[in-house]
Image (spheres, coloured by chain):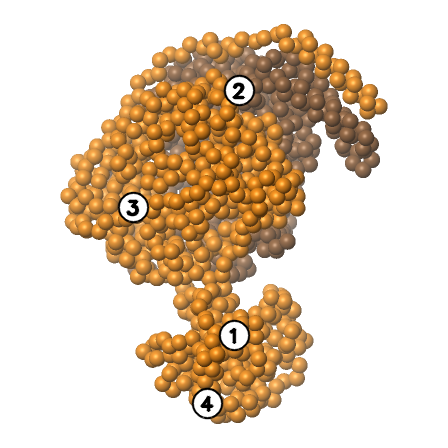
Amino acid sequence: MGKNRFRVLLVILALSAAMVSSSSAFDFTKIEKQVSEKTLDNGLKIIVLERHDVPVASFITFANVGGVDEPKGYSGLAHMFEHMAFKGTKTIGTKDINTELKLIAVEDSVYMLLRSERLKGNLADSAKLVAVEQAYDKARNDSYEYIIPNEYSQIVKREGGVGLNAGTGKDQTVYLSSYPSNKAELWMAMESDRFSDPVFREMYKERDVIMEERRESLEASPFGRLLDELVSAAYKAHPYGIPLIGHASDIRNFTREEAIAFFKTYYVPSNMVVSIAGDVNPDDIFKLADKYFSKIPYSPKPEPVTIIEPPQKGERRVLLKDPAQPLFAAAYHIPEGTNPDWPAIEALADYYGGGRTSLLYKKLVKEKKIAAEVGSWPGYPANKYPSLFVIYAVPTPGSSLEEIEQDIYTELDKIKNEPISPEDLNKIKARAKMNFINGLRDNIGMAIQLAAYQTTYGNWHQMFKELDKINALTADDIKAVANKYFSEDNRTVVVMETEKN
Amino acid sequence: MSKITSIILLLAVVFIALFGSTITFGNELDNLQYPPLNKIEIPKVEKVTLDNGIRLYFIEDKSLPIFEAQVRINCGGYLEPADKIGLATICGQVMRIGGTQKWSGDELDELLEGIGGGVETSIDRTSGWASVSLLSDYTDLGLEVLAQVLRNPVFNEDKIELAKIQERTQISRRNDDPFPITFREFRKKIYGADSPYARQTEYATINAITRDDLIEFHKTYYQPQNIQIAICGDFNQKDVLKKIEKYFGDWQKSEAKVPPPPKVDYTYANKIYYIEQKDAPQANIMIGHIGGFTLDKDYPARIVMNNILGGSFGSRLVDNVRSKEGLAYETSGRYSDNVEFPGMFYAYALTKNETISKALTEMIKQVKSMQIDTATVQEMKFGKDGYLNSFVFNFDNKTEIINRIMTYDRYGLPEDFLFKSKEAVEGVTASDVVAAALKNLHPDEMQIVVLGDKDKFDVPLEQLGFGEVITVDITIPSGEVKTDLDVTPEKIAKGKQVMMAAINAHGGADNFAKIKSISAKGTATFITPAGEMPFVVESIEQYPDKACTKVIMMGQEMCDIVNGDKGWQTGQDGKLAPKSAADIADSKLDQLRDMVHIFKGIDEPIYQPVYDGEGEFGGAVIEYVILLDQNSKKICRLGFNKADNTIVSSSYWGKSAFGEGNIEETYENMTVFDGVKIPALVKKSLDGQPFSKFAISEYKINQVIPANIFEAN
């Protein structure tokens, strides 16, 4: 075994010595120099990466708002708003906006009556409930008469836009699309419109769609159920512990008024970044941005979440009885992504559970064959605030979950007790470099990264410094974080055992 | 009160409607002027064919210091025998993880991860694949590794086992996630459950795969004339070609031909299938029938038809099932095609149990509408202009471009197929779309697959008018090796005869009848890939139904007790805990399989010996007897050496410390104690993989048994 390893090392060393060509010499600052930025008077930051090889461009709106910012009783609202952002504006998606708005107001007032009656529970007046339900159905159908369904998306598609989508996280909401590059102005017009003048049409029906999304992504998915238990057990106070998609009862009771209030607080130019990558001219883009996005008025940047998760005082364990086959997950509290310890934690995750040569894969999958899949990743469910380091394992049939759990800790102890070898440290750095380069490939990935670093650090240049942080790591740094964060008291474990109904 | 409210609301609505309709809005977006699109520079693909038939495709791209290769091999799961489904998948996996003549699989892992790169291989239903992705500094190494995995895989046994365990894990979990169940069962209804386009791996088909099978499959199809390699990235074509010659040039082509994928026989039918999933929080619906071929004349019209029917916002399925009715988050539908075998037409939705018939009705309505309602101007803009306006995105990724050219070449499509399709789409009219729908869609003859909990459905499936509801059983079959046993009086007589000869050879029925209990001591060893793990075992069997086994492993004592219908086992806390009913049933089965128990009780009704022919084991002729219980259920299959009638093996489907499977026990070192001959060495294997041996150092018959040893105290 030791001998074999030596042979491979020789090959790697030989290769490194012979390395004279491109990648070592590749100038990453070249890409950095293709990036320009501008801040509009209302505080909106625009970032442009110029790349002219193909006449296409990707467009990102990165809103610094997510599940963590939801008020109590409104879990899932950030995601709900993301859905509403595709419903159109005062000029898109309607046959007659004035009439529609009046009908929406009626729909709202009847809905509020219905809502308060329903919330009475057992004490609700059933006759009244039926009548209000009927009135509400009518009001809703009336307002829907004036809708052109999905017109917003239809325009994007017919003009050649692709990949129109959005994603909500605990920390942020990202809106993405790509167009032939001559349609930049269309994107400007439509994107600025939906964030200055949105109409939350079909809001109440959309809650049903989201309930189906919840069933699909969380309730029907074994991993969804496992991770939901994990975060809710790991967090007592911080909203990272609340499911991103929202509690079912919250989703059912959303009101349009609250969704609008949420939008007005968080979707302000000072809290958003626009990022564009592709065949565009920055000056043209800045002019267009000024023309279209300046109509959104300035508003102060909303406050970050003030809740601080208290330190965990002892291991928390959840036994989840589930119809699916067994699964295992554990989580340790780790700091936020901007913490100086973060690069060492990322390196630890790669060494511990990253690839086929990681400690966990070698021990549990290759050697003992008790897990079919195993891994570790830092930053769940997000990392703007103190986060979790998650370890998971998929047992092979008949394997013991106790043995898997024990091996997971034994491998972790190795990192705590012994500094990792120089070869393993180099491997982590080589993998990080390849990851970084892969991240530069496509326009959409670049646009997202630039916007994300701008939002997190207030400076997109940080993106190009990440690799330096990993390269500066020593074996002691990794050992130090292993001992600092990975204690039993700081751990939450979820064991999923099979129990058929 | 309630009445008044609704009347007031009614008035308000009417009022607004009267005045509202007079206001109209022009859409300013229509007035935008777009500059002309910059020229699309379509990168040139260089093609080279080596003397041995390997076809090469090159696109140079200096934008990043990366070297990438995509390899396609003419083969696929369709070529594997029906009793070895999974052979191709495992072959594709082990080519890489099992290592090559030059490097072991683990060495490859270290080597590639050490430079942040990757080389991967796989085989799907209709193609073999390999890929290389690494920094361009390592181009030479990447090509050498690629050549090694394609040409010289060694199919290491341990890694075959790893791949098989991974496959078994997948099988065991395949009913955990609802939508993949629905999709897979739907696929079976379209292509047939045994079709290479739909069939699935089972424990039995995985267990049947041997290393020789993998070697043979690889040798037959991985020949240079079946291989295409597409290379993309930062390189100099001349240099790379030289390196490829170095690593692949001396590979001699073979004459073997790869049979084409089989044809599909499909008969349109209107049937409804139900998969019961009481635990599923959401129901699934999938409807459709067989699809078409890529070279069909109306392929361009179908592109527009698909866009209008389903997929994105603005399509009929999404607008109606999702946006208008709020019935689903996920709904989609398309008529798909392949070059060599037909695609599928399908539409699906994930909706709650309580709205299943509503969603199904709406979906069928939308499929029908494609034949009735001519696409509107808006829909044509969306479905046709959208395709044309986004055409440039066919060229924004060089890997995609080169893969497309490779695919066209593989299937003999013209290189300008994409451009020809675009020209044809430009000419598609709304009536062409209706014609395509009329020709290709059969809304009244669809296979309907529904998953969910029928007790919660809004309308019973029987009442939907699709005829008898056919329940689909998705129980996962165990991997038990089934022997076709034709029980005849002759075989029973012969079985009994072989058993009696064995009992005599082992000391005679009288001596076995005297045995009341056996106390044994010895060392057992678990054989694991990580090495051998020995432990001390002490057991006491009191016939017919009591046993106590003590095991000392790493200083810790663990105990297992069976006492009739009761049983206990040491738990995690080190204390005895009652066993579950299932565990007790397993223990009782184990007792039935105990050699002494069998020889003592061969006349009891619980044992039905049936002769099962002759075979060979370790150079000796073996006679087999299958023991059935009174319900004709198999207990085990025993093997006896024909020369001296002694027992050599017992095989059965059961549980071990390493999982459930086909267990085989072999008996060695026969030793005489108190007149009976008992094996002093028992070896066990699971699905052909040895996992334990038990060497007995001491056998004592009819010893004094400590009081209360079969109780939990």
Residue B355, position as x, y percentages in the image: 63, 37
Q: Say if B21 sits above or below B428 in the image.
A: above
Give the number of callouts: 4
**Secondary element at tag 4:** helix
Chain (orange)? B
Looking at the image, tell me whether mark 3 or mark 4 is earlier in sequence order.
Answer: 3
Q: Residue at left 45%, top 36%?
A: B345
Viewport quadrant of the C terminus of chain B: bottom right
Viewer-proximal residue, B365 or A408?
Answer: B365
Image marks 3 and 4: residues in contact by CB distance under 8 Å: no
Gap in angstroms between the C-alphas marked 3 and 2? 45 Å
Gap in angstroms between the C-alphas marked 2 and 4? 88 Å
Which mark is in front, 3 or 4?
3
Which colour denotes chain A? Answer: brown
**Secondary element at tag 2:** helix
Disc 2 packing (10 Å; few <14; some 14–19; many ≥20): many
Residue B260's disc is: 3
Q: Is residue B129 left or right of residue B508?
A: left
Residue, disc 4: B504
**Secondary element at tag 3:** loop
Q: Say if A3 sits above or below A179 in the image.
A: below
Q: Is residue B572 left or right of residue B621?
A: right
Viewer-proximal residue, A122 or A250?
Answer: A122
What amino acid is found at the position of numbered circle 3 in the picture? Answer: Pro
Pointer 3 and pointer 2 on the same chain: no
Image marks 1 and 3: residues in contact by CB distance under 8 Å: no
Which mark is in front, 2 or 4?
4
